[in-house]
Amino acid sequence: MFIDRTNITRVFYLGILLDLKRVGLMVRDNNPGGSSRPYRSFPTRLYEMVNDPLTDSVISWSESGKSFIVWNQSELCSEVLPKFSLGKVFSNFTFKLDTFGFRKVESDQWEYANDDFERGKPELTEEIQKRFLASLSPEAFVFKRSAEDARVIERTRALQMAMKERALAKNLSNLTL
């Protein structure tokens, strides 16, 4: 299961409510050693990329520090985005920006801004959520079983217990022979 976790700490998956902070969700790193590290959200990786002085010729903060500018789109896609696990296709990158509420600033360059994305304040990236998730209430992530579901589950458990008891009785009778 892959989860792009921005500020979501609970996720419902296959009938299970997961508390991601408690489980300490880990993902595989893309390095050859295959070590695990905590998952970093898209806004966090984007901040690291924009803030990296080695990428300033390709992507950097604007003068105000309240937006970032893509200076070289082709180099961004071929070299920089893959380094930060952000893909390789510019249209996918801009779609992801839009999904997280970044808006294009009117200028001659590819300039994007978000109220919670500011130079020198990496902690703000935790406030950036996918737009459709931000509109959901916390109750949307809570699973509620119907009474019928509970009865079916209880019957299934009773059948499983009966089968285990029969198998155990059969094993015991085989031992006494």
Image (cartoon, rainbow, N blue to C red):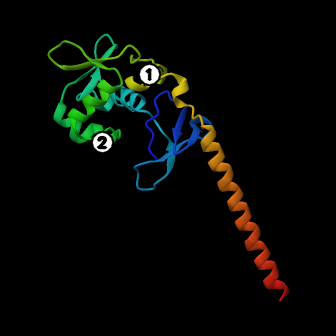
> Looking at the image, is 130 positioned above or below residue 104?
below
Name the amino acid type tagged 1: Ala
Q: Nearer the viewer, residue 140 or 125?
A: 140
Element assignment for label 1 = helix
Label 2: which residue? 82
Label 1: which residue? 134
Between disc 2 and disc 1, whose residue precedes?
A: 2
49 left or right, relative to 149: left
> Looking at the image, is 36 positioned above or below residue 48?
below
Residue 110: image location, x then y, percent = 20, 22
Residue under the point 81% across and 78% down = 172
Residue 139: image location, x then y, percent = 55, 25
Residue under the point 31% across and 10% down = 64
- Any part of residue 130 in sight: no
> Looking at the image, is 101 positioned above or below residue 148?
above
- Any part of residue 158 in sight: yes
